[in-house]
Image: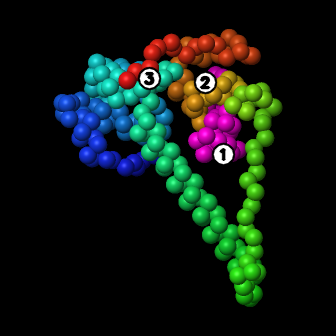
Amino acid sequence: MHYYTHHIGDFQRDTANLSDADTLAYLRLLWIYYDTEQPLADEPKKLAFRIGSDADTVQRILENFFVYQNGFWNQKRCDAEIEKYHLKAQSAREANQKRWASKKDLKSDADQILTKNQEPNIKTKAVAVARPDDVDQKTWDDFLQIRKAKRAPITETALTQIRNQASKAGLTVNQALRICCARGWQGFEAAWVKPDDRKNLQASSNVLPDWAPKRATGA
């Protein structure tokens, strides 16, 4: 997403004790979060390079404004804004589908005047994407639950994107989906997986290894 609601009062209150440099670093970290629609990877040095800051500053901001979980830094406010964005986008898509369906009905039957009781039923039932043969049932069921919780129904396009990114990461689509289930992701990008994660997954085709870092949740 390239737009989000910036609450000036809340931001000023939360950053009142920060220097100008720290405030800018925090703001740029938020921009990365919103742009990727994903939590920040636990890589302070790489993040610092991306935003023109230093690793110590980034680590300090992460620990004070984000929550560490399963190798990533999450932020409730960002997650809420991203979810709101997806709900609005989904609502707009549904409205467009209804509008185009109505226009199609009117064009095909232009000479007929429809009364309120004669209006055609344009509702269609969503077609579920079948489980791929190379994905086990439990992994598929768990992934569908994540997509459902995020109000993001799985589509052929989304599944193809995940498959392409899994191949790019050197993983099977089943392994990629298990990572999504472990980390609560609704999608998958090769860049989000560290080399050690790939090695652990590639070493076993049936059991998801305990590769997630064991660290306490940050405040």
Q: Which residues are magenta?
A: 143-171
Relative placement, left or right, of 67 versus 187 is: left
Q: Which of marks 2 and 3 precedes in the sequence?
A: 3
Name the dominant secondary structure of the magenta segment: helix
Residue found farthest to the right: 133
> At which x and y percent is residue 4?
39, 48
The amino acid beneath tag 1 is: Pro
Q: Would residue 97 appear left or right of 133 to someone viewing this image?
A: left
Q: Secondary structure at mark 1?
A: loop
Earlier in the chain: of badge 1 and badge 3, it is 3
Q: Residue at the location (47% across, 14% down)?
A: 215
The x, y position of residue 100, in whole percent, is: 65, 69
Q: Nearer the viewer, residue 103 or 92?
A: 92
Question: Splitting the image into 4 quarters, where does residue 172 fall?
Answer: top right
32 lies above or below 193: below
Q: How is the image coloured?
A: rainbow
Question: Distance of mark 3 from mark 2, alpha carbons?
Answer: 15 Å
Q: Residues within 10 Å of mark 3 (few under 14, many from 20)?
A: many
Mark 3: amino acid: Tyr
141 within the magenta span:
no
Give the quarter of the image for residue 212.
Answer: top right
Residue under label 2: 182
Q: In the rendered image, which residue does mark 3 sit on?
A: 68
